[in-house]
Image (cartoon, helix red, strand yellow):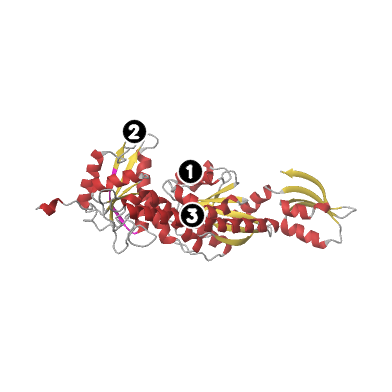
Amino acid sequence: MGDDTQVSDPTESHRGAFGDYGGEERAFIDRSFREKIVLVGVSLPSGSPEETEAALDELTALVDTAGADAVARVVQRREAPDPATFIGKGKVAEVRAESDLHDADTVVFDDELSPAQQANLVKLLGRTAIDRTAVILDIFAQNAHSQEGKAQVELALLRYRLPRLKSTKRFSQQGGGIGTRGPGETQLEVDRRRIERRIHKLEAQLRTVAGHRRTQSKQRRRTSNRGVAIVGYTNAGKSTLLNRLTDAGVLTEDRLFATLDAATRKLSLPGGEKVFLTDTVGFVRKLPHQLVQAFKSTLDVVIDADLLIHVVDASAHDPEGQIKAVQEVLDEIGADEIPQLVVFNKIDIADEPAALMRAYEGSMAVSAASGEGAEELLNAIADRLAITNELVDIIVPFDRGDIIAELHRSGQVMSEQATDEGMKYRARLDTFSAGRMSEFVVETEGNQ
């Protein structure tokens, strides 16, 4: 009977490794089975019950993508999060009862939990408790394939884990006693130093990658090639659009975060101009700050772009909410001033794409899957890039056919006229091309 009072880990009776740092080396979940998950959402005064339900719908999809099943959800309205448990002890009891009813392995909160809140919830719920951030990190860990992508995800995971080390199950072999440190403390310090060293190494590695990207960006600008980046919510169809416009052959899947590694291809515009078109990682509501920071080297391609193609799933439940979430990330990385072309995708299955387009002046409608609207989109990209060019007047001697050919190849010719000195052109040129032809420029009217 005395043994029955022995303190044990409250999660041992459950199979879940989701958030327990078990399973795969870089992931949170053991995928030898599909865990049963209870979702918890909190409506604060800054939001609405409808927004909370929509967020839980998305969290259900995230959990499914991670390899588990959401079996129930609990929603609460609060004025402010509870410092100890986020939802308060009374609601914790309700969540535990719901979890016991469904024999759930893990409880997932839609909002980010502090390390202390997470530790308290694990004890009170008797099972693993994690947040949306952990689920997203787990999905990224599954989907990273390139060396850079793996390094970025590992960095984000380590930054997330570091303050939560005290809740792990690993202990040192050193015993406790008077004048000595307690069991596990030494191992905790070792783990912390090991993770901090690894974080510093990964940060240095990604700084080197960022340096290479800056060098490539400078080389691109010296060769007058413009950069266009495709951004948008996860699963909006960005990779499908890249394939449609460039025959890139990038793998596309109908699931969240199928693309983590940036893919760049050359795109020929209707006027003959060549640009670099890059597909980027998808964004999501409440995208973990750790991921935004870890993926900064990849997102530099967005910051350096001349134009952003903001792809929106027109068939989504809340496309405007998705636009807002993407814009928040663009603001965070400093890309909010870059010109954007909003493109509503999946119009072949959307209910009212025209209404969305009316709300966003200058937007386009396409179906990346069928190709509808692709030609119009190419023309729009060319026009948007041309607007950012200098409008110049150039007189080219009749015997300089090479300059005339380059002018047509690298710029947008607005008009041409024969004069005594040669052919006079009014054209829009990017800064690099305008500089190369400066000896023939007779008048510059600046950006118009």
- Who comes first in sequence, dot 2 or dot 3? 2
| Foreground: disc 2 or disc 3 | 3
| Residue 5, image x, y percentages | 14, 50
The residue that label 1 is drawn on is: 324
Q: In the image, which disc is placed on residue 241? A: none
Amino acid tagged 1: Lys
Direction from residue 429 to residue 423 in the image, left or right: right
The residue that label 3 is drawn on is: 200
Direction from residue 233 to residue 424 in the image, left or right: right
Amino acid tagged 3: His
| Residue 129, image x, y percentages | 30, 49
Proximity of marks 1 and 2: CB atoms separated by less than 8 Å: no
Q: Residue at x 77, y 61 (%)?
A: 405
Residue 109 is one of the magenta-drawn residues: no
The residue that label 2 is drawn on is: 79
Magenta residues? 67-74
**Other-residue count near label 3 (Cα within 10 Å), few / some / many at <14 / 14–19 / ≥20:** few
| Foreground: disc 3 or disc 1 | 3
Dot 3 falls on a residue whose secondary structure is helix
Q: CA distance from mark 3 to mark 1?
A: 33 Å
Direction from residue 256 to residue 338 in the image, left or right: right
Amino acid tagged 2: Glu
Q: Nearer the viewer, residue 158 or 333?
A: 158
Q: Locate the C terminus by quadrant.
A: top right
- Who comes first in sequence, dot 3 or dot 1? 3
Q: CA distance from mark 1 to mark 2?
A: 24 Å
- Who comes first in sequence, dot 1 or dot 2? 2
Dot 2 falls on a residue whose secondary structure is loop
Which quadrant of the view contains residue 243? bottom right
Q: Residue at x 39, y 51 (%)?
A: 162
Q: Nearer the viewer, residue 432 or 318?
A: 432
Viewer can see residue 369: no
